[in-house]
């Protein structure tokens, strides 16, 4: 099973930017990598996904402020977050899906992003 390690979270003021990174262990190719978040008391929600050939998909709430990208050679996915607002405060989770054997659907441990007003 692949291991995902997120980094780049922390405490920022409203209007600031942050860039999250998520590195996947091993050398197996990953079909889809993505970012999700879960605010306190709410369900986990999709932010964005990116396929191995660069196709992206964004939640409506993320369009315009968040950008997902990946480096296939490093098995790493990034999330650039701009103009952060207090409502963006959440635990952010990385996800990796491999559709071919050995299949997996892996999650990172989560990283906290706190945006103060």
Image (cartoon, grey):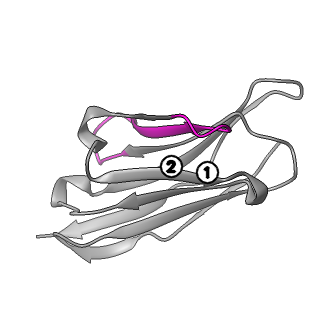
Q: Which mark is residue 93?
A: 2
For label 1, the SS is: loop
Q: Position of residue 14 (x, y in %)?
A: 16, 70
Q: The C terminus is located in which quarter?
A: bottom left
Q: Position of residue 43 (x, y in %)?
A: 35, 33
Near-viewer residue (65 or 26): 65
Q: Which mark is residue 100?
A: none
What residue do we see at 28% from left, 42% from top? 63
Q: Which residues are magenta?
A: 38-55
Q: Position of residue 78 (x, y in %)?
A: 53, 58
Q: Quadrant of residue 103?
A: top right
Relative horizontal placement of residue 76, taking residue 45 as reference (left or right): right
Q: Residues within 10 Å of mark 1 (few under 14, many from 20)?
A: some
Q: Quadrant of residue 25?
A: bottom right
Q: Is residue 40 magenta?
A: yes
Q: The N terminus is located in which quarter?
A: top right
Residue most extreme to the left: 117
What residue do we see at 23% from left, 62% from top? 84
Relative horizontal placement of residue 106, taking residue 37 as reference (left or right): right
Near-viewer residue (51 or 28): 51
Near-viewer residue (89 or 15): 15
Q: Which mark is residue 108?
A: 1
Are the residues tagged 1 and 2 within 8 Å (C-beta)?
Answer: yes
């Amino acid at each position: 099973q692949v291991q995902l390690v997120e980094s780049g979270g922390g405490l920022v003021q409203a209007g600031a930017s942050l860039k999250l990174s998520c590195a996947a262990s091993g050398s197996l190719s990953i079909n889809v990598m993505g970012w999700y978040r879960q605010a306190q008391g709410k369900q986990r929600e999709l932010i964005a996904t990116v396929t191995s050939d660069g196709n992206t998909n964004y939640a409506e709430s993320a369009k315009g402020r968040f950008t997902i990208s990946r480096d296939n050679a490093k098995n790493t996915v990034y999330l650039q977050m701009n103009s952060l607002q207090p409502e963006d405060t959440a635990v952010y989770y990385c996800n990796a899906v491999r559709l071919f054997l050995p299949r997996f659907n892996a999650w990172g441990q989560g990283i906290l992003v706190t945006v103060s007003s």
